[in-house]
Image (cartoon, grey):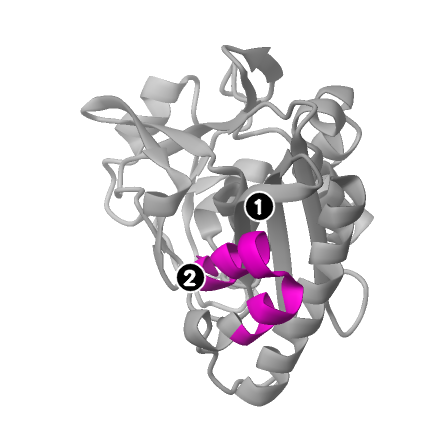
Amino acid sequence: MKPAPFGYAKARSLSHAIELLGTDDAKLLAGGQSLIAALNMRLSRPALLIDINSVAGLDTIELADGHVEIGALVRHVQAERSAQIARHAPLIALAMPHIGHPAIRNRGTLGGSIAYADPAAELPACLLALGAELDIAGPGGERRVFAENFFRSLFETALGPRDVLTRIRIPAADANTRVAFAEFARRQGDYALVGLAACARAKGKNLDDVRLAYFGVGPTAQRARHAEAALAQRGHEEAIRALRTDLHPDDDLHAPAAVKMHLAGVLLRRVSTQLEQRA
């Protein structure tokens, strides 16, 4: 299929992009890896596409004030190859090879994936596990939102109709940071049936401040808070049992809920082993 007719405008600056978003039914175009497919299937029919690829300052990776700051236009492949991300945001580095295929990672942007908020995508879960913040610019100025408050429902975020996600801020890892990542997908590059991003602090031979963020098991990525507490205090078998309180997946075209719950437990066992080995 081909997309329905639409207008096109190239934003000269961030303020110009926000101004153009005042047009009825306008959408931003960055990497386009999700948007173009939706256009071609006519699942999305915007009146105007606003190309923000030339907006300056949104494609950098920097270390500032104890955080890794990643511009929304940073390509997946740029993050995948970044020495700063590998050192200071290693969970993002672990997740990158699981995102799509090389052709998708060459064009897709971190900001686009996060703003699209697919419940089976890797990055939203990583941001939840890391306690990340997101910088947003809009007609009323700039604001900062924690990832916990950014992902609201199925494909729904804290972004308003004239907002632009500009930057992701992740607390920089230190010697006591422990991260792990695992997912089940039918084929390499497919969206995950179930996935898990984890972050913790080493406390001697134990773990503290455990954060377990699942994806593919609900309308958004979500923390498994009871399992987090159980893993820190009583080990992974108790944590797996606690998942029955945390996760309530539905049957879908890819797997029934019972299979998803089983896979969630298998992933927790794998991820907890990774965390403990590095503690």
**Residue 265 pos. (x, y %):** 64, 73
Q: Are marks 2 and 1 in contact (CB under 8 Å)?
A: no
Nearer the camera: disc 2 or disc 1: 1
| 227 falls in the magenta region | yes
Label 2 and label 1: CA atoms lie apart by 27 Å
For residue 215, what is the image quadrant?
bottom right
In the image, taking residue 127 as reference, residue 259 lies left or right, namely right
| 117 falls in the magenta region | no
For residue 15, what is the image quadrant?
top left
Which residue: 53% across, 26% down?
171
In the image, taking residue 197 as reference, residue 155 lies left or right, namely left
**In the depicted view, which residue is nearer to us: 140 or 20?**
140
Give the total of numbered labels: 2
Q: Residue 126 carries which label?
A: 1
Write down the region rendered in magenta: 220-241
**Residue 118 pos. (x, y %):** 50, 59
| Amino acid type of the residue that numbered disc 2 sits on in the rendered structure | Ser
**Residue 212 pos. (x, y %):** 55, 54
Other residues around mark 1 within 10 Å, as few (<14) / some (14–19) / many (≥20):
many
Residue 36 seen = no
**At numbered mark 1, what does the secondary structure look like: helix, strand or loop?**
helix
Which residue is tagged 2?
44
Whether 164 is drawn above or below 252: the answer is above
Residue 212 seen = yes
In the image, taking residue 229 as reference, residue 193 lies left or right, namely right
| Amino acid type of the residue that numbered disc 1 sits on in the rendered structure | Cys
Q: Which mark is residue 33?
A: none
**Residue 250 pos. (x, y %):** 46, 83
Which residue: 47% across, 34% down?
132
Whether 137 is drawn above or below 278: the answer is above
Where is the C terminus found, in terms of image quarters? top right
Is the magenta region chiefly helix, strand or loop? helix
